[in-house]
Image (cartoon, grey):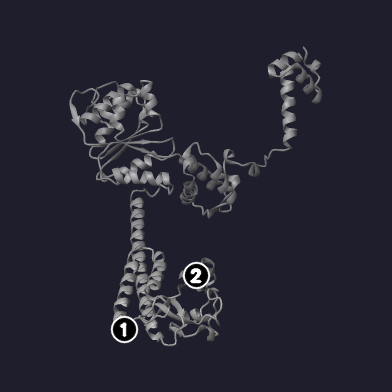
Amino acid sequence: MNSTIAPAGTMTNPKDSSDIAEFALLFEISQILDRSVDLRDELGPVLKAMERNTGMLRGTITLVDRENGELYIEAAHGLSGDQAERGRYKKGEGVVGQVVESGKPVVIPRVSQEPLFLNRTKARKNLNKDEISYICVPIKMETAVIGALSADRLFDADTALEEDLRLLSIIASMIAQAVRLRQEHQEERKRLLDENTRLQHQLQEKFRPANMIGRSSGMQAVFDLIAQVAKSDATVLIRGESGVGKELVAHSLHYNSSRASKAFVRVNCAALPESVIESELFGHEKGAFTGAIDQRKGRFELAHGGTIFLDEIGDLSPQTQVKLLRVLQEREFERVGSAEPHKVDVRVIAATNRDLEELIKDNTFRQDLYYRLNVFPVHIPPLRERRTDILELANFFVEKYSKVNAKYVRRISTPAIDMLMSYHWPGNVRELENVIERAVLLTTDDVVHGHHLPPTLQTAEASNTKIQGRLDETLARVERELLIEALKNAKGNKAQAARDLGITERLMGLRVKRHNVEPKQFKS
């Protein structure tokens, strides 16, 4: 407070030292407010500094709750936790409520004579006995009042409270300034975070084809890998189960590379017979074999300057693997029927759903070729591991096949969604696409229902195939069937049937009697 209040409670100091004491207090408070990012951590130390330098009995910093507009004590000195918790007000209620509502300070020489002073914290036990002076000033940010700073001390008739009011107003202004700076810092930090998030989303969208859906963490990792390697000429090996979308990743790599304007040539290594695959890959000369009536360029030559996508690379024969290895190492090949080498500038992207490491152990896939292909591996997770993508993919395919079939399918019903989400999708995205295409063709009311989905996706409720009967009844029925089957095989011999079932003859007799089975009827 001011220099007129001493630590002994009289708040009166010699005049010549008052300015120095006040300056020291304000300097200490400024250092406190500057040392933490979270201002709430420093409000308590501010009140302690005021107590050390002014001798105030109690002090509080009350703030406005932005959600409900109520006032609560954020920091307190000289109050217990329970007392501070009781210090809650509405705007206009009590002295603090009026200061916040009006934005004007209040000075009360004697709280015992002020009916507005509620003493809600119960910190001042006997207002009539303990003569207390109370000063409360608003904490303002421009024109908005965000709280109040208050302090009380023992009443002294010789002390002018205007000096105390001036000092508290300065401290309140310092707190408001610190709050404003923190808010500006937080707003700037939020702006930078939002900008960073926006740029990340742009980057993710840039490297995602229009028909490649996925917001799961697994697919976001795939998009990040595509972004990292697309601009380079590095060989990429795409791994994943059949139907996960390996070709879409290959397309994304090509069309986001510097080779996007050149050819993208796809080769399905599993679909080409061994007798023609070499000709398909490297071409042939006229007369190289029966039926070679003209010279023909191979897929590598057609992809010159662009990208060649070798799908199902794990199905290549050992002989073709050797020739492919040379192309990857030397970037040259020879047409079938020719010894003339041809240089080729092509980026290689390979894909497989097979375990190449196991093939290497079985000596069916060359280890050196594996190392040449596995420069930058990209693994696409199966659909069952990214269930958050299922509904988005399903909606995409509904829209796609609605346009293809000139239908207007508005939505997928809730039971159908539950069936899609609970299925394990062994065929991955390709199977989901086929399921939705079929459902779009079957619907007659612009909604995909559960009964439009294949039997493999049907639930017991949707297909009306709920298990009937109690558990004990079902187990008894199964047990009886097993007994009859064992007796049939043993031609009515209970001892043999018991051995076949792995039970004792005594237990066999009890079970036969319980289920009313006559072994004699099975004797030949």
Mark 2 Cα shell of 10 Å, populated few (<14), some (14-19), many (≥20): some
The circle drawn on residue 79 is 2
Q: How many labels does the image show?
A: 2
Q: In this orientation, does residue 92 appear? A: no
- The picture quadrant where one finds residue 286 is top left
Q: Circle 1 sits on which residue?
A: 15
* In this view, 268 is above or below 500: below
- What residue is at 24 percent from the left and 45 percent from the top? 258
Q: Is mark 2 on a helix, strand or loop?
A: loop
- What residue is at 28 percent from the left and 39 percent from the top? 307
> In which quadrant of the rendered image does the C terminus lie?
top right
Residue 21, given in percent of the width and then of the height, sits at 32, 76
Going by the numbered disc 2, the residue's amino acid type is Leu
Numbered disc in front, either 2 or 1: 1
* In this view, 523 is above or below 111: above
The circle drawn on residue 99 is none
Foreground: 145 or 97? 97
In the displayed orientation, state which residue is furthest to the top.
524
Going by the numbered disc 1, the residue's amino acid type is Lys
- What residue is at 37 percent from the left and 27 percent from the top? 357
Q: How many angstroms separate mark 2 from mark 1 (CA)?
A: 31 Å
- What residue is at 74 percent from the left and 29 percent from the top? 477
